[in-house]
Image (cartoon, grey):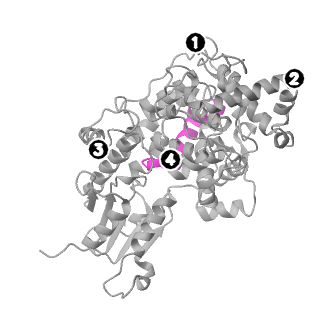
Amino acid sequence: MPPASCRHLILILGDQLDGDSAAFDHLDPTRDVVLMIEAREESTHVWSHKARTVLFLSAMRHFADTLRQRGWRVAYRAIDAEGDLTLADGLRAAIARYRPERVIGVEPGDLRVRRQMDEALESLVTPSAATAAEQPASFMEWREDRHFMCALPRFRRWAGQSGSLRMEFFYRMMRQEYQVLMDDGKPAGGQWNYDADNRKGFGKAGPQHLPRPPVFEPDAITREVMALVGQEFAGHPGDLERFNWPVSREQALQALADFITERLPDFGKHQDAMWTGLDFGWHALLSSSLNLKLLNPLEVVLAAENAYRTRNLDLASVEGFIRQVLGWREFIRGVYFLDMPELKTANHFGHDRPLPAWYWTGETHMNCMHQCISQTLANGYSHHIQRLMVTGMFGVTAQISPQQLCDWYLAVYVDAVEWVELPNTAGMALFANGGRFTSKPYVASGAYVKRMSNYCSGCRYEPETRTGPNACPMTTLYWNFLDRHETAFTANPRTALMIKHLQRMAPQDRQLLRAQAQDMLAGLDQL
C-alpha cells in the first residue's frame, strides 16, 4: 500500500475550533488533510487543571467529528493513540506520513506554540532540498486569525509608538467602526461607558433571584476524555465532578442564548460582587467558548445589542458586557502581540517570592482566598473580580513572582490561552509591566473585600485590623505595599490619595505595620 499523501496539511490547534477559519479557505477535500494534535506538553508546561484539559480535548474531538461530517479527511493524533509529547512531534510525524506540498495554519494565540512549530519545520528538509536552509519559504503558510474584530495590523496602527495605551479610546473606535450601540453617530444613552453603574454589592441580604446556568451533560466523547484525563493527569489540580462547559458549536450557541435571555438583563449592577457559594451569578460564562472559537465575538456582540434594542434591557448591563467583548478582549489580544516577548518576563516591582502552596489547594485561613481558589479548583472558573481583586491583588501586595502567578492563572482556568491570560494578569492584575495600559496598581485593603462580599464573615482575620494577632493579611500587606512605594505613588494622581491616608499614620504605627508585614511575608504558606 503506498504511503498517504496530500496537497495541503491544514493544522488546527486546540483553541482554533472555528468552522469558518481562514485555514479552510480553498480547501479541497479530495486533496487536503486537516491535522489536529493532542500533545501531552499542552497540559504539563503549566500544571493544568483537569477541567481545562478535558475542555480542550473534548472540544477538539467534537470539532474533528464535525469536519468528518463535512466529508473532509482529518488526521487526528490523540494522546491515547499516537501519544505525542509535543505539538512539534505530532506535526513532524504527520508531515512524514502525508508528505504535503504545504502546511497551512492560523496564527497561534501562544507565541511559544508558534516558535515550536517554526522550529519543527526548520528541522525538516524537503526531498529536493539539500539543506534545511533550502526548504521553500512557502512550505508553511500562517494566516491571519479573522475570528477577531480588530486585525493585528489595524491594532498596531492604532497603538502607534505610544508608550501608554488606554482601552477606553480603543473601545470607542471599535464601537464607531462596527456601529455598535450607536444612535445617530453618538453613543446610545449619551455616554460611552456605564461602568460606574455596575459596581454594586449585594448588601446583607445577599444575592436574590439567582438564575441557573444551562446544564451540559457529558456525552460519550466527553466521558471518554474525562476518564482519559483522570488516568493520564491524575496528579493535576482540580476535579471534574462539576464539569459543565460547552464542548461544541451547538452547545456554545445554547450557552449564548441562555445568557442573553436569562442573565444579561441583570448582568451589570452586581458583576463585581462576590458571595460564598455564588460560583457564577449573572456572569456570561462564554469566555471559554469564545477563546476556543466555538463562538464568534461579532455574533455575541450583536446578540447582546439586539436584546437591548428589542427588549429594552438595562443599557448599563448591555454596554458593560459589550465593552468586555468588543473592547477589552480585542484590546488585550493586540497588547499581547505588540508587547511580547518582554511581557513574559516583566517584573516592574521586582517581586520574587514563591507562589504559596495553598494557591493549588485553597487551604488558607484567609476566607476570601479560600473561597475564590476552592471555586476555581471545583469549576476551573472564577469571575474577573475574584481574579483581579482577590487572588491577583494578594499576589501584588505579597510580592509574589509575577511569572509564577501568571503560570498559575494559565493553568487553573478553562478559558486560559496565553494571548488573553498573560496581558490580563501580568499587565492588569499584577502591574508587572509598570502601567503600560493601566494607570495604577489594582490594590485595596480587606475593607474592599468586605464591601463587595460576605467572605470576611467568620474569617479568623479582621479586615479593619492591620497589626496584631487578628490582622488581615489583605489589609496589612496593602498598607505595607503603599509604604514601600510611597515616593512613586505620591507622584501618581491615581494613587496620591492612598498615600495621604498612609501619611496620617503615626510613625510608631508604621513601624508596627512593617514588622507585621515582614512576619506575614516570611510565612506566606501559613496564612
**Three-letter amino acid code at disc 3?**
Glu
**Three-letter amino acid code at disc 2?**
Ala
In the image, residue 298 lies in the stretch drawn in magenta: yes
Residue tagged by mark 1?
A: 458
In the image, residue 213 lies in the stretch drawn in magenta: no
**Three-letter amino acid code at disc 1?**
Gly
Query: In this picture, is 479 found above or below 163?
Result: above
Query: Residue at point 27% right, 58% down?
Result: 76
Marks 4 and 1, how far apart at CA:
44 Å
Marks 4 and 2, how far apart at CA:
56 Å
- Residue 232 image label: 3
Of mark 4 and mark 2, the one earlier in the sequence is: 4
Of mark 1 and mark 3, the one earlier in the sequence is: 3
Of mark 4 and mark 3, the one earlier in the sequence is: 3
Percent from the top left, x then y, of residue 82? 24, 58
Classed neighbour count for the residue bearing mark 1: other residues with Cα under 10 Å, few (<14), some (14–19), many (≥20): few
Query: Residue at point 58% right, 40% down?
Result: 305
Marks 1 and 3, how far apart at CA:
39 Å
> Is there CB contact under 8 Å for labels 1 and 3?
no
- Residue 36 image label: none
Query: In this picture, is 53 found above or below 361?
Result: below
- Residue 506 image label: 2
Mark 2 vs mark 3: in front: 2
Classed neighbour count for the residue bearing mark 3: other residues with Cα under 10 Å, few (<14), some (14–19), many (≥20): few
